[in-house]
Image (cartoon, rainbow, N blue to C red):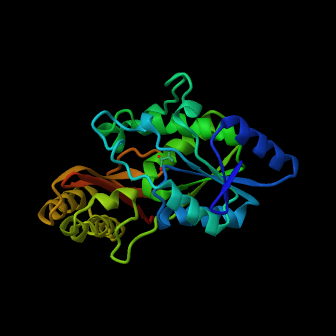
Amino acid sequence: MTPTSGISVIRAVSQLCDQVSAWRGQNRRIALVPTMGALHEGHLALVRRALEICDRVIVSLFVNPTQFGANEDLDAYPRDEAADQAVLGELGVHLLYAPTLEEMYPDGLVTPIQVPELAEGLCGAFRPVHFAGVATIVTRLFSQSSPHVALFGEKDYQQLQVIRALVRDLHIPVHIEGVATVREEDGLALSSRNAYLSPAERAIAPLLFATLKHVAAGIETGGGVGELIEEGKKALLEGGFSKIDYLEVCDAETLKPVSRIEAPARVLAAAHLGTTRLIDNVAVKVG
Ligand code: PAF
């Protein structure tokens, strides 16, 4: 283990397994917060919650190539490991696990993990390899670090549901905790990709959350799902978004589109501002 900026950093799977076995031998409760780095307050909310509920917190930092499509932003994805180490050290995180590509994929992409149904709609329809990449890396991180709890942001709601399903279906003994989205004062959900927005795009970006809230509130007060979705799409395009991948109302668990609200539901959207794709979602209250 290399202590850097007050935090221990491990890059090899074998060293991680040794550390985790030692902690398990001391009956420590272990949390894992998987990240791709470029940490912002959204990630730090996951870390703070992990520190509240567990004795030992591991943050993983790995920009996972298998979850990026061929024309996506893998090369441009923001990276600043020194800054990430410093902030995690200040928070009191016990271990930063920052494996190399060779450690994570020594034989390339063998044994991929798929969660077909949940991964097909919404973002999955536009990013065909994304959720298999996420499911594969998260399964590897779980088997390497054997955490009691793993924490993920609700901002990536489809990802959270995919991970809940893989844990359930593969009987992985880890509790998945979803943490509420952290937002800027104007409502924009924090995301590492917000750094790509020009000042003009940044000014338009909060319209995504405002639109989702408008759709959810309309449904809660008896409005029609189809009409509210069409209104929401029109508002986004008129407000300056260049393209909408989807704006849908879905069952909160299965992520199947719904036209009437009979169980907890979620309004989810992905829309483009120039070359930046933003996603967000809000709950629809029932009853
Ligand atoms: O949400 C992310 O940052 C990534 O998808 C994750 C869960 C760390 C897997 O690479």
Q: Is residue 259 above or below residue 169?
A: below
Query: Residue 258: image x %, image y %?
Result: 35, 49
Nearest to the observer: residue 261 or residue 119: 119
- Residue sitting at the far bottom: 185
* Side (left or right) of 255 relative to 29: left
Left or right for 193, reference 21: left
Q: Return the residue found at the far left.
A: 238
- Judged left or right of residue 206, residue 282 is right
Q: Is residue 278 above or below residue 114?
A: below
Tell me which corner region of the image, top left, top right, bottom left or bottom right, holds residue 185: bottom left
Q: Nearer the viewer, residue 136 or 180?
A: 136
Within the image, what quadrant is residue 193 found in?
A: bottom left
Picture coordinates of residue 139, whole percent (x, y):
59, 36
Residue at 48 percent of width and 60 percent of height: 39
User: Residue 107 at x, y = what percent?
Assistant: 54, 22
Q: Residue at x 47, y 40 (%)?
A: 64
Q: Is residue 264 visible?
A: no
- Tell me what residue is drawn at x 43 percent, y 52 percent: 79
The residue shown at (44%, 66%) is 285
Question: In the figure, is residue 56 to the left or right of 280?
Answer: right
Above-or-below relation of 247 to 236? above
Q: How many marks?
A: 0
Residue sitting nearer the eye, 214 or 244: 244
Q: Residue 89, located in which quarter of the rendered image?
A: bottom right
Q: Position of residue 43 (x, y in %)?
A: 52, 61
Q: Is residue 156 visible?
A: yes
